[in-house]
Amino acid sequence: TPTPHHDPDTIHDLVGIGIGPSNLSLAALAHPLTDLDTAFYDQRPTFTWHPGLLIDGARVQVPFLADLVTLADPTNPWTFLNYLKSRDRLFPFYFTEQFHIERADYDAYCRWVAEQLPALHFGHQIDAVRWNPERALFEVDFTQLDADGEAEALGRTHTRDIVLGIGTAPHIPEPLKPLVETPSAPVIHAADYLTHRDTLLRAGHVTVIGSGQSGAEIFLDLLRNRPAGHERLHWLGRTAAFAPMEYSKLGLEHFTPDYTRYFHALTEHTRDHLGATQWQLHKGIDADTIAAIHTELYRRTLHGGWPDTVLTPGVRVRTAGRIATTKIELHLEHPQQATRTRLTTDAVVLATGYQERPLDHVLAGLDPYLRRDNSERPRIDEHFRLVLDPSVTGTAYVQNAERHTHGVGAPDLGLAAWRSATILNSLTRKETYRLPTRTAFTTFGLEQRTPHIPAARKPPTLTPLTDGR
């Protein structure tokens, strides 16, 4: 007998694709809604959250209140505090007086939630999503995977609405892609740092590329664990300085629903320009991490001399190659100085960030219905709904795929619960979760504008679309 979520006759109210923190938040807030039938799928065997970056002591950059549910419903059973209570850790946490928890603790908390939500189905790879106009339902095809990730069975489920939370993928700069794809001297992305940490600690010379938080944490970890006077570390970044993250109280109000609404109501051109200027809101380095790096470097001057480290911002990698299979040669350029040089190293860690996974593959079956902006990105309305042709009566929501429409807070954990609650309110067509009308002391803009979605360009004439829609 097929389980309910595999039964082809079962029609879900909502199917989620991907189970990262965003869709895990949505599943946790949907769980108490007994009249809502949901199912969430992920191809991984279990929940994991950046396992390669769970470095000892590394902290989440948002307060613990930015858990999966608290900022939408602090009475929900899946709060971080309830997780601590279930582990008899509430009093120890109380006495630590720490607002920012370690990444490993956040990961363990999310896994605790994931293990208890029956709507989550791991080991399921989504193959296709289609709109069935005759049944007015989405069809979702999947492959069920065994413990080794091999195909075990094919299946299909039907749903009135879908939500995509497929997250981000490591970004590899073009000049370095050929090096990552070859197995000799290690060139790895920061996402895999802990897997290769022992190899990196043994390497003769290591170069860390990337001036954000991950680059700083990895440089600090390598620095602390390599011998004094023989550190042999380079740290390079494209930004003009190893800059601190914007963390002033009013600066943080860019991560509020108020700012999200303001940003969404701007024109596409303005949003694109503005987004490019706000890197320090999310790509800078935590001030405590900068201080810890400086303290460790200073400590190594105690007996005279300087540590064998080079920290150079404002540098870009032009090209890269291998020398005799065991060395890596980086061709560097300093645009401000108009200088170039070569750096030979034994290993490279690319702390070059993440990029949104494109929706095009999973949504290929919906492509004729999708409305796109001038840069061919999906249009997304203020309720996180993809703008589809009016002939599609179902709704497709997105999570952490809307930075181009909703701004810098899209991937921020602090907005996850609010976004999930917004989606559930839209889905249930009522105020299932009461959300605040004001969340910031800052007033963004001189007038409160209604979000505007430009008229779509005329799509190709395809059945079942209506001409001119």
Image: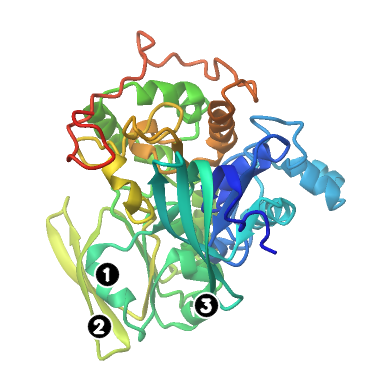
Whole-number angstrom distance, CA of label 2 to CA of label 3: 34 Å
Residue under the image location 42 percent in, 22 percent down: 261
The answer to whether 292 is drawn above or below residue 65 in the figure is: below
Tell me the quarter of the image containing the C terminus: top left
Q: Residue 60: in sight, yes or no?
A: no
The answer to whether 469 is drawn above or below residue 69 in the figure is: above
Q: Residue 77: in sight, yes or no?
A: yes
In the image, residue 323 lies at what x, y percent? 24, 86
Residue position for label 3: 150
- Which label number is shown at residue 322? 2
* Residue that protrudes farthest toward the front in the picture: 134
* Colouring chosen for the image of the structure: rainbow
Element type at mark 1 = helix
Mark 2 closeness class: few <14, some 14–19, many ≥20 residues within 10 Å: some
225 on left or right of 347:
right
- Which label number is shown at residue 176? 1
Element type at mark 3 = loop
> Callout 3, which amino acid?
Glu
**For marks 2 and 3 on the same chain, the one whose residue lies earlier in the sequence:** 3
